[in-house]
Amino acid sequence: MQYCQGVPNIKATQTSYAVLGLLALKPWTTYELARQSERSLRWFFPRAERAVYLEAKRLVALGWAESTKTATGRRASTVYAITRAGRRALRAWLAAPSAPPQLESEGAIKIFFADQAGTEHLRATVELLAEQTDDALDRLATMAAGAFTFPDRMRTNVLSMRLVSDVHQALADWADWAAGAVDVLDAGDEAAVERQTRETLAVIAGRPARAGTPSNH
């Protein structure tokens, strides 16, 4: 985050830089920005449409974008374009260290509190997560096999697409395991439940260190 010189009450947010990155590709109206954000950024940085509209105005206030009024027939619109200062700010942000990744999932919250409602609701949540993940993987596969708006960017874009695809595949694999885990809970065999709990904790605790990661021993 950083403040803009001469604009003391306005600071850039992560969303500011996300929208600034889109403006680095080409000028957009706010409607086009929202649609492009929905198509691409939402896979790893979901934001409400209104937030995108507000950020475009914030970028103008920061001096990182400029707006131009246009009209198509009787329909007026505003086109936003990145400025030189905006490109400098974007490059500086790209070079700065990133915040740690965070998982945001309503389903994960419901699973965390599943002991308050019983396995019926837990199973339904796991099944819905599996369906949602399968749908996401199908859409990603369709995108990967289709035409791209900016084909010249795909040599780097494939890295983020692979990241998103791998995350959803991991969720799909987890959902398969979780369905079996719920079966164990449903069976009501306390010894089996305790064994499953111990084995799962052991798997998490025994995660191998990455190559080059210092050992605690």
Image: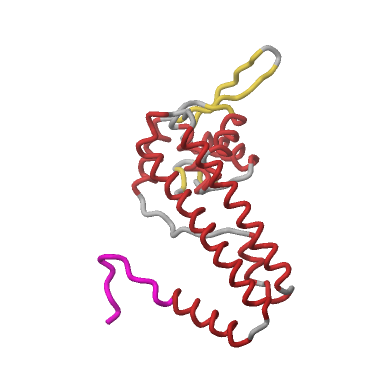
Q: Where is residue 79 in the image (x, y as percent from the top left)?
A: 56, 24
- Name the residue: 50% across, 26% down: 27
Which residue ends up furthest to the top in the rendered image?
73
* 186 lies left or right of 28: right
The boundaries of the magenta stretch are 205-217
Which quadrant would the C terminus be assigned to in this image?
A: bottom left
Q: Position of residue 197 (x, y in %)?
A: 54, 80
* 133 lies left or right of 1: right
- Name the residue: 61% across, 43% down: 51
Q: Which of 188 and 200 is in front in this view?
A: 188
Q: Let me know if residue 211 is in the magenta part.
A: yes
Q: How many marks?
A: 0
Report the coloring of the rendering: secondary structure
Q: Where is residue 200 in the image (x, y as percent from the top left)?
A: 50, 76
> Residue 110 sits in which quadrant?
bottom right
Above or below residue 13? Residue 59 is above
Q: Let me know if residue 17 is in the magenta part.
A: no
Q: Nearer the viewer, residue 61 or 98?
A: 98
Q: Where is residue 143 in the image (x, y as percent from the top left)?
A: 51, 36
- Name the residue: 47% across, 34% down: 145
> Residue 97 sits in which quadrant?
bottom left
Q: Is the magenta stretch mostly helix, strand or loop?
A: loop
Q: Which of 164 and 81 is in front in this view?
A: 164
- Name the residue: 61% across, 39% down: 54
